[in-house]
Image (cartoon, rainbow, N blue to C red):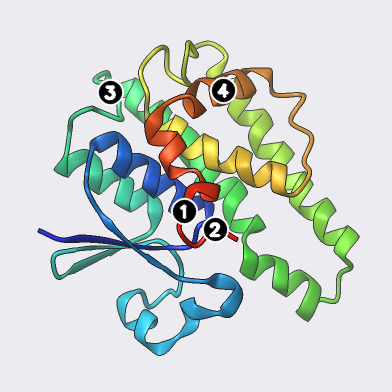
Amino acid sequence: MPITLYNYYRSSTSYRTRIALNIKGVAYDVVAVNLLKNEHKHADYLVLNPSGGVPALKVGEQVLTQAHAILEYLEERWPQPPLLPKNLEARANIRALCQIIACDIHPVNNTSVQHYLTETLGHSETEKMAWIAHWQAKGLAAFEAMIKPIAGTYCYGDQLTMADVSLIPQLFNARRFECDLAPYPTLLRIEAACLALPAFEKAHPMHQPDAI
């Protein structure tokens, strides 16, 4: 069954999806959707994904959207290697970590929000960057505090999970916006371990065909 990922190289949600596909060993084709050229707003793309976001994952004739929903689908469709622990409470904690990224940080920092801040509300570039830094710091501080009791090589001991898959792209974003990551030594240590893995290296934004 052909699998096609519609994504933008620098999108953190696309980055998450690429990492998970690579970890699962799922072969996929890539179609670049350039957000800077508003290709996500083109009529043909909106047929695939009415919300106009990336990624979209086409599996056969079925189109899946929303990165975390796609991660859950991949976990259920290809359960090995697992990206969720066996323990029920641990699974809930991993999902909570993912939602810090997916619900608390990313939505208020994404491109559409940035444009609304500057173009509609008239905020300056300095004010926009302060907004981004505030929400990055708030979310990453919570993430750091939550994983300290359970972290090993990765966010959950020595098992790769969805938490790692979600974290690494967010740290890439934080650097893009010059956010100070020094207060999060646990996250930086985990990042170094993850980036040494082929699945993460292959998924890195600067290794994508549409990277600028």
Q: Measuring from the top left, give residue 209's x and y in whole percent.
A: 45, 58
Q: Residue at x 18, y 29 (%)?
A: 80
Say which of marks 4 and 3 sits in front: 4
Direction from residue 85 to residue 198 in the image, left or right: right
Q: Secondary structure at mark 4?
A: helix
Q: CA distance from mark 3 to mark 2?
A: 39 Å
Q: Measuring from the top left, give residue 1's x and y in whole percent.
A: 9, 58
Q: Secondary structure at mark 3?
A: helix
User: Can residue 33 be seen?
Assistant: yes
If you read the primary sequence from the N terminus, does the residue marked by circle 4 or circle 3 appear first? Answer: 3
Q: Amino acid at mark 1?
A: Gln
Q: CA distance from mark 2 to mark 1?
A: 5 Å
Q: Amino acid at mark 4?
A: Ala
Q: CA distance from mark 1 to mark 4?
A: 20 Å
- Pick the quarter of the image with the C terminus: bottom right
If you read the primary sequence from the N terminus, does the residue marked by circle 3 or circle 2 appear first? Answer: 3
Direction from residue 195 to residue 113 in the image, left or right: right
CB of mark 3 within 8 Å of CB of mark 2?
no
Location of mark 1 (residue): 208
Location of mark 2 (residue): 211
Location of mark 3 (residue): 88
Q: Residue at x 55, y 49 (%)?
A: 206
Location of mark 4 (residue): 192
Say which of marks 3 and 2 sits in front: 2
Say which of marks 1 and 4 sits in front: 1
Residue neighbourhood size for the residue with mark 1, other residues' Cα within 10 Å, grouped as few (<14), some (14–19), many (≥20): some
Residue neighbourhood size for the residue with mark 4, other residues' Cα within 10 Å, grouped as few (<14), some (14–19), many (≥20): few
